[in-house]
Amino acid sequence: MSKASSRIKRRISAKNTLRNICEQQSNFLIIHYSCESFYDTPQGRTPRITSIAIRYFDTAQTKSFSIHKIAEFKNVPFEQIENHYDELEKIMLDEYFDFVSKHSKYSWIHLNMRDINYGFEAINHRYIVLGGV
C-alpha cells in the first residue's frame, strides 16, 4: 500500500471517529491535567499531579480537581500548602477517582495521556504512591 493510500485510509478513519463523537456527544468526557515539571522533581520521584479538569463534551460543563481547591476547603493557609502537598494531592485524587468510578460508561478524550510519564497510568501511579487503593 502506498503512503498516500495509507494516509487517505487514516484520514477517513479519523473523520468517522469525529463524526461518531459529534453524534454521541453525551457519551464523551474530555480530560486534561497538570503536574510538576518532569525535570525538576526531587529525588527522582514521579511528578505531583496538581490539577485535573474534566469537561462534559455535550454541555461544556467542567469539573475541576486541584490541590489549591482542596487546601482552601481544608482551611490550609496558602503559605502552608507546600507542607501538606502529599495529603492534599491524595484527597484531590480520592475525589477524582470517585468521579471516574461514577462515569465508567463514558468514553474519555485526551491529548497524549498515554504512558507512565504523562497519562492515566501516571495519575494512577501517584495515587498508589500516596496510599490510594
Image (tube, rainbow, N blue to C red):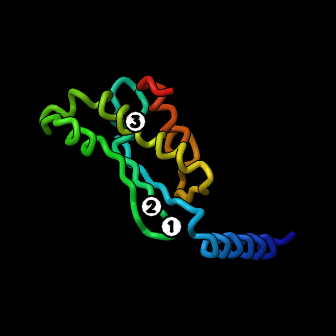
Q: Could you say which is closer to the camera, residue 36 or residue 21?
A: 21
What residue does disc 1 label?
57
Say which label, 3 or 2, has the lower sequence index: 3
Label 1 Cα crowd, 10 Å radius (few <14 / some 14-19 / many 20+): some
Q: Could you say which is closer to the camera, residue 92 or residue 110?
A: 92
Camera-nearest label, 3 or 1: 1
User: What residue is at 39 percent from the left and 55 percent from the top?
Assistant: 63
> Which residue is situated farthest in the right direction here?
1
Secondary-structure class at tag 1: loop
Report, in whole angstroms, how far the alpha carbon at label 3 lies from the one at label 1: 28 Å
> Which residue is situated farthest in the front direction here?
102
Q: Is residue 16 above or below residue 123?
A: below
Label 3 Cα crowd, 10 Å radius (few <14 / some 14-19 / many 20+): many
Q: Is residue 41 left or right of residue 112?
A: left
Image quarter where the N terminus lies is bottom right
Q: Is residue 36 left or right of residue 73?
A: right
Say which label, 3 or 1, has the lower sequence index: 3
Q: Position of residue 62 (x, y in %)?
A: 39, 60
Q: Is residue 123 above or below residue 7?
A: above
What residue does disc 3 label?
47
Asked if disc 2 and disc 1 are in contact, CB closer than 8 Å, the reply is yes
Q: Please state which amino acid type lies under the numbered disc 3.
A: Pro
Q: Position of residue 34 (x, y in %)?
A: 38, 48
Q: Is residue 39 visible to us here? A: no
Label 2 Cα crowd, 10 Å radius (few <14 / some 14-19 / many 20+): some
Secondary-structure class at tag 2: strand
User: What residue is at 51 percent from the left and 26 percent from the top?
Assistant: 133
What residue does disc 2 label?
55
Q: Is residue 15 visible to us here? A: yes
Q: Please state which amino acid type lies under the numbered disc 1.
A: Phe
User: What residue is at 17 percent from the left and 34 percent from the top?
Assistant: 76
Q: Please state which amino acid type lies under the numbered disc 2.
A: Arg
